[in-house]
Amino acid sequence: MIFFYWLVAVMTLDQHWVWGREILGQFTIIKLLGILCLLIALFKLVVGNAPLRRLYEKPPTRWLIALLILFSAGATHSLPAVVSTAYQHVLSILVLWVTVVTLVGSVPRLRWTVLLAVGSAALASLYTLRQQLTVGIGDPGFRAAGIFSDSNQYALVVGLWIPIAVLWTFSKRPTWERVFCFGSLIVSLLGTLLAASRGGFVGLTAAFLYLGIRSPRLLRKVAVVGALMIPLLVWSSSSLLRRVRNPSEGDQQAQQARLIVWKAGLRMIEAHPLIGVGMHNFKSQVLRYEDESERVESVAHNSYVEIAAEMGIPTLIAFVGLLGATLTALERVRKRSQHLKSEQLSLTALGLQAGLISFMFSSFFLSAWFEKMVWLMIFLSIALYRISCELGLFRSKTSLRLKRRELATIAPPETV
């Protein structure tokens, strides 16, 4: 598992000068780690340590298989310039699915994987803070992105793991875990505020509203953390408040460009409703669907419009169906683990739900369906549901008392 944990820890650093450097042809260290983890997972499947049914037996997986088939079909009619990238994205999703569902087969492994994912988001945020202090200190409109190519992309990825960091910070866990999650939370929130992404802010707002509805007792503690961020929110020259109240010329141009490409994307969907124009062909085709007075060659800046325009409405249905099935499975785990008084599983399910909700809202303003950290969260959610089934969380009511005792031995020791 050490190689898998290593992969998760550096997954946000795929553009880093070390981890993203090509060393064997087009293979980076992260890609080589992914291949090694896949080989380990396949070995476990072959020798029987991990049952093959893990890959297909749970409801969200059926949506996933359908989506991968449709993704592959969309990649077949990509333009020659992008067909390699299209197939790489499909293959990376497939590899990550097999790896995560096979290797994350117990509560302790799930716990370590989530901790490392939270830490990976914090590590990426440290690069964002350093960039703000070194590059953006004299630029009033600078928006830090760290090692990411875009501040909106950074905010979306980090926003996936902020909700679970909040929940684990204020839950009954070992002291070192709570300190680790709290430190990661503060760094990630600071980086997100400096990135000043309006889409990321919408996603996090939706996630925290969901947490408040599902866990009202956490509202006061979350409010305290939020209050610590207010001075920076007001002080930052590129803050969200300034971008909303007094948008710069660049902000207004970006907003107008999004409206133009969204309208062109809808026309693209209308012209090719079933199979789309081909994966990653949106940018090269968008000028054909814009008005003569509106000429913006750009990506869709909307994951849902992009999927439907490039691969057809059936693919969009499968994508939304996968997200809905994953949230439903997590809700089952959350309710049943609450009933069994297993706080660890309940809060983990709730945090993963909130992270996915953050993505669903943020991705409305960004083309990010292929982000690896998004798929890691989806596959961890599927793994959690499968682990819960294997633990017997969905057995008949007659066995609930025995199951409570069993879960009590699995949970980490409480703080003193």
Image: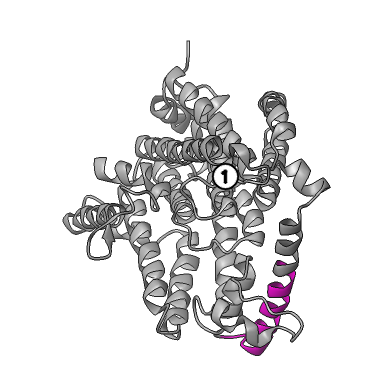
Residue 76 occupies quadrant: bottom left
Query: Where residue 321 sits in the image (x, y, percent)?
Result: 58, 65
Residue occupying image coordinates x 46% and y 51% = 373
Front residue of 206 and 84:
84
Query: Where residue 403 sits in the image (x, y, percent)?
Result: 45, 33
Q: Which residue is mark 1?
A: 144
Residue 318 occupies quadrant: bottom right
Left or right relative to 248: residue 414 = left
Colouring mode (rainbow / by chain / secondary structure / one colour): one colour
Residue occupying image coordinates x 63% and y 66% = 302
Residue 138 occupies quadrant: top right
Indicate whether 104 appears above or below 219. below
Front residue of 78 and 142:
142
Instruction: Identify residue type, mark 1.
Output: Ala
265 in the magenta segment: yes
Segment tinted magenta in the rendering: 258-274
Mark 1 residue crowding within 10 angstroms, few (<14) / some (14–19) / many (20+)? many
Indicate whether 77 appears above or below 95. below
Residue occupying image coordinates x 21% and y 52% = 40
- Magenta residues, dominant SS class: helix
Front residue of 155 and 62:
155
Is residue 165 visible in the rendered structure shown here? yes
Mark 1, secondary structure of its residue = loop
Indicate whether 264 appears above or below 24. below
Query: Where residue 139 sits in the image (x, y, percent)?
Result: 63, 43
306 in the magenta segment: no
The quadrant of the picture occupied by the N terminus is: top left
Residue furthest to the front: 138
Residue furthest to the left: 47
Is residue 342 visible in the rendered structure shown here? no
Indicate whether 301 appears above or below 382. below
Residue furthest to the right: 245
